Amino acid sequence: MTQALPPRSQLSRLSAPDAFWWSTGIEDTFITAPHPVTGRTLDEYELTGHYDRWHEDLGLVAELGVPCARYGVPWHHIQPEPNTWDWTFPDETLERLLDLGVEPQVDLVHYGLPAWIENAFLHPDYPKLVAEYAGRLAERFRGRITWYTPLNEPRITSWYCGRLGWWPPFRRSWPGFVALMLAIAKGMVETVKALESVDPEIVPYFVDATDLFDTDDPAFEDEARRRQEVVFLALDLVSGRIDERHALWPWLLKNGAREADLAWFLDNAVALPVIGMNLYPMFTQKKLLRDAGGRFRIRMPYAGADLIIRLGRLYHERYRVPLMISETASMGSLRRRLNWLDASIAATRQLRQEGIPLVGYTWWPMFSLVTWAYRQGRRPVTEHLAEMGLWDIVPDESDPLRRVRTPAVDIYQQLVRGGIEAVGMLMEASSHAAALR
C-alpha cells in the first residue's frame, strides 16, 4: 500500500538542513494499579509534587530556553470514569507552556491507563478508547499543538505488562508480550488516525526505547539478533513493514500472532514522520552472557556515547526519517551527568556531520525522578529519588521535594542559545562545572 506523507509544512520543518530542537521533559510514568503487596501506585507527578508545583515547574522548563518540551498528560485524571471527562489539568498546563513560548510534545500514554479499563491494553475496546481520548485532546488544542506521542515506549510497555507481569494486565510470557505489542500498536495506529482527522498538521512523534544487543558467545548470536529485531517491532508494525519476509514473522506466529492480526497493520499502515530514540548509558547496552552455571543472562554495562552513533546509523538505515534523541541522561553525580551531556552531544553532532538527520536532543528528566522500585517497596519516596536531572530534588525540613538548581542548568542554557554546532566550546565549561561537585 502507499503510505500517506505528513503535511508538507511539517515535513519541511523536520527536513530543513538546519533543523534542530532542544527539549526537556518531566518524568510522567503513571501506573494506576496498586501493587498487590504494598498497595502503592506509581504516579510520578504525584510523587514528585508536580500536580501542586506545575506552574513553577513549567517555569523551569522555560528558563532553559528550549523551544519545545515533552510533557505527559494523565489520562487517568482526565477520564476517571468511562463517561466523565475533566480537562482542567491539561488545559492549565498546556496553556502555560504555550504562554511561555514552549511547544508541547504531548505524551498521551506513558505506561499506565485509567483503572476502569479492565484488562488494560488487552481490553477489546482499548484502540477505540485511546483514539477517542487522543482526538478529544487534539480538538481542544487544534491549530496550536501539533506534536503528539501516541504512546511512549511500546516495547517497554509490552515487556512490563506482558513478559514480566509487573503492570496490568500482568502477563508473564512471550505470547503475553506479543499480545500486548499487537494491542498497543493497534492503539497507536488508531490514535494517529484520530489525531490526523482533527488536524492534518499534527506530527505523530513515535518514541521507543532503543536497546543495543551484543554477545561474544556464538551460542547466543541468534538470540541477540532476534532481540535486536524486537527493538524495532512496534515501529515496524505501525508502519506496515511486517509480512512473510520479515525476520520476526515465524517468531510472531509461534507466539500467538495470527496472520490476520499482522495483515491488519499492512492495510492500516501510518507514516513515521519522526522517530524518538530513548537511550541511557546505564540501561541501553545489553550484553548476552553465560553465567557460571551455563545459563543465559543479560548484563547492562555502562556504555559510552558510541551507542548513540550505532543507534543513529541503525535507525537511519532502517527508516530513513528524521530522528530525535527523545530521552537521555546519566544517573548519579553532577560530574557523571555532565560528562554524559558532553559525550552525547558530541555524538549527536558527529551523526549530523555524517548526514544523518538527527534533529533534536532531550535531556530527560529535567529534575530527579522516583525510581519504579517505589511501587513495590516500603521506603519513603525521598529514598527513591534518582539524580538524573538538571535540577535535583533535595529534601529539607521545610520542603521534602525542593528543586535545587545545578550548574547543568547554565550549561544547557548555553547549548540551547549556541546551537548544536557550538557544542565544542562548552566542553571545557562543563568539565569545570563537574569538578565543582
Image (tube, grey):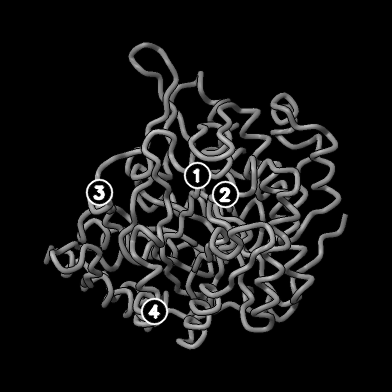
Q: Do the residues bearing badges 2 and 1 touch, measured as CB atoms within 8 Å?
A: yes
Local crowd size for mark 3, using a 10 Å CA cut-off: few (<14), some (14–19), many (≥20): few
Tell me the residue at 50%/79% (across/down): 92
Q: Earlier in the sequence, mark 2 or mark 1?
A: 1
* 432 on left or right of 143: left
Q: Earlier in the sequence, mark 4 or mark 2?
A: 4
Q: Is residue 321 above or below residue 102?
A: above
Q: Along the line of sight, which residue is nearer the eye, 139 or 280?
A: 139
On the question of residue 259 being in view, the answer is: yes
Q: Secondary structure at mark 2?
A: loop
Q: Secondary structure at mark 1?
A: loop
Res. 380 mark: 3
Which residue carries the number 1 mark? 33
Q: Do the residues bearing badges 1 and 4 touch, measured as CB atoms within 8 Å?
A: no
Tell me the residue at 60%/31% (across/down): 226
Q: Along the line of sight, which residue is nearer the eye, 27 or 244?
A: 27
Which residue carries the number 2 mark? 115
**Snapshot quadrant of residue 394:** bottom left
Residue type at mark 4? His
**Quadrant for the C terminus in the image:** bottom left
* Mark in the foreground, 4 or 2: 2
Q: Along the line of sight, which residue is nearer the eye, 130 or 1?
A: 130
Res. 55 mark: 4
* 291 on left or right of 269: left
**Snapshot quadrant of residue 434:** bottom left
Residue at the farthest top position: 293
